[in-house]
Image (tube, rainbow, N blue to C red):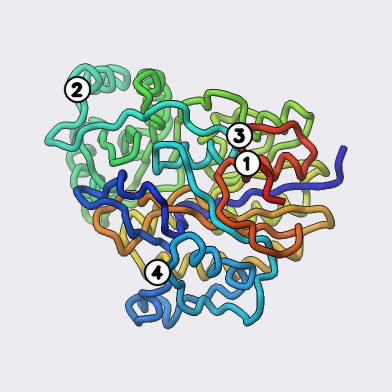
């Protein structure tokens, strides 16, 4: 077995602009043309427009030194001001990746970077007074023993819970909603409704939604009360449709390699090919990543997702919060690099964009940065998402997966 190890780290929604088909994707009536998550955050910071809880230009010297600012320029032609980058040429392999799957969602991005572009069109629910048909709602209610469901339309995160939670606590009906992504989300109170009951409901209704080509059913538990307010918990769980063919995780597993999953990777890939799953909030996930880098077996593959860029700041259109999260992650890079062994490959990338300066509250169609540590330095250019899988399989001396070509 090879002594090499590989770590694929996804900064969820940290796009860098420039997707050539962005005009085909929308936030409301506005096409995503010109969206640029990293570029616009950096510009807002430089202009003094992101000083809540932080101050000044966006400071990401470690990733910038590895080529992050150069990746933004390559992807979009736009400048990401400052970033705190040291002078000189980038010290890692750097470039930007373009997606071919027809979705700007989590499964599409992760599957494709794992070698499996999505071969079908996802089902999306209409944005109107009611988004779901009566038969589906009746089945949801029947599965959990409720007399009905609440909300039943498009909505954004905590705004949905804040509007419907008080009634939910009174009547016990689940809160059902969707977004511009191919998702069906069910929110419920962990105490009044029950976490186990919520998760069972999502698991039971998921096969119905998956037959419709809805990508994910998401359990969205929360706690709190009317007096003190309601808050989501860390017990979110995604019930994703199975990938249509073997992914990078399956290929590694089939070759007898150990596969570690950190964050929501286990949900995205339905635990296929995964041996070790570690979850928590992003700060806990960073601890898990560092632990795995200390412990991971030779020849192993680790797949990590840091979701809070997307869930807490992108969808909430919180520029200052997003910038703070980026700076926190960048400050962890020396700890990551200190744990790298000879032969390790660490790839940082994203699954889509979620520009917090953009109209609406949904993902944005963007290219994503690709930064690779452990294989020298230089520009890899504009690559495909599936090239990430091809590069990791080459590095780990595994059978090829998907249509990509290695950029190593």
Q: Which one is in front in this view, the residue at disc 1 or the one at disc 3?
A: 3
The residue where tag 2 is placed is 133
The structure residue drawn at horizontal position 47% and vertical position 31%, both measured from the top left corner, is 118
Q: Is residue 135 left or right of residue 112?
A: left
- Indicate left or right for 66 with 363 as reference: right
Q: Residue at x 26, y 34 (%)?
A: 176
- Of mark 2 and mark 4, the one earlier in the sequence is 4
With respect to residue 36, does 173 lie above or below?
A: above
Mark 1 and mark 3 residues within 8 Å of each other at the beta carbon? no
- Marks 1 and 4, how far apart in space? 29 Å
Label located before the other in sequence (1 or 4): 4
Q: Earlier in the sequence, mark 1 or mark 3?
A: 1
Give whichever of discs 1 and 2 has the lower sequence position. 2
Q: Which mark is residue 261?
A: 1
Circle 2 residues within 10 Å: few <14, some 14–19, many ≥20: few
Q: Which residue is mark 4?
A: 41
- Mark toward the viewer: 2 or 4: 4
Residue 274 place in picture, x, y as percent: 65, 33
Camera sees residue 284? no
In this orientation, which residue lies closer to the viewer: 307 or 171?
Answer: 307
SS for dot 3: loop
Of badges 1 and 4, the one in the foreground is: 4
């Amino acid at each position: 077995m090879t002594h090499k190890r590989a770590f694929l780290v996804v900064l969820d929604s940290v796009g860098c602009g420039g997707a050539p088909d962005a005009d085909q994707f929308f936030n409301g009536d506005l096409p995503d043309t010109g969206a640029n998550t990293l570029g616009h955050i950096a510009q807002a910071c430089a202009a003094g427009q992101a000083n809540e809880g932080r101050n000044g230009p966006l400071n990401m010297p470690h990733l910038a030194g590895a080529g992050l600012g150069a990746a933004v320029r390559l992807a979009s032609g736009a400048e990401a001001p400052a970033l705190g980058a040291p002078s000189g040429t980038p010290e890692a392999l750097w470039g930007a990746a373009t997606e071919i799957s027809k979705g700007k969602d989590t499964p599409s991005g992760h599957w494709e970077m794992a070698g499996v572009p999505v071969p079908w069109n996802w089902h999306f629910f209409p944005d109107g007074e009611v988004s779901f048909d009566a038969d589906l709602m009746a089945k949801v209610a029947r599965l959990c023993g409720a007399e009905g469901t609440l909300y039943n339309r498009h909505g954004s995160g905590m705004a949905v819970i804040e509007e419907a939670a008080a009634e939910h606590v009174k009547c016990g009906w689940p809160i059902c909603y969707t977004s511009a992504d191919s998702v069906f989300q069910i929110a419920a109170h962990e105490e009044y409704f029950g976490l186990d009951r919520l998760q069972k409901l999502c698991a039971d209704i998921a096969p119905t939604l998956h037959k419709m080509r809805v990508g994910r059913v998401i359990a969205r538990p929360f706690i709190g009360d009317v007096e003190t307010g309601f808050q989501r918990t860390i017990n979110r769980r995604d019930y994703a449709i199975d990938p249509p063919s073997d992914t990078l995780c399956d290929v590694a597993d089939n070759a007898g390699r150990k596969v570690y999953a950190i964050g929501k990777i286990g949900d995205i890939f339905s635990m296929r090919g995964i041996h070790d799953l570690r979850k928590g909030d992003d700060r806990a996930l960073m601890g898990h990543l560092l632990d795995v880098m200390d412990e991971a077996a030779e020849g192993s593959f680790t797949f990590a997702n840091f979701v809070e860029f997307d869930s807490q700041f992108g969808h909430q259109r919180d520029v200052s919060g997003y910038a703070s999260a980026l700076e926190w992650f960048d400050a962890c890079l020396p700890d990551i690099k200190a744990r790298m062994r000879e032969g390790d490959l660490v790839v940082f990338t994203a699954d889509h964009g979620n520009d917090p300066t953009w109209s609406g509250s949904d993902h944005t169609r963007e290219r994503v940065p690709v930064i690779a540590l452990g294989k020298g330095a230089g520009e890899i250019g504009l690559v495909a998402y599936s090239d990430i899988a091809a590069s990791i399989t080459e590095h780990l001396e595994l059978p090829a997966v998907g249509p990509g070509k290695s950029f190593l």
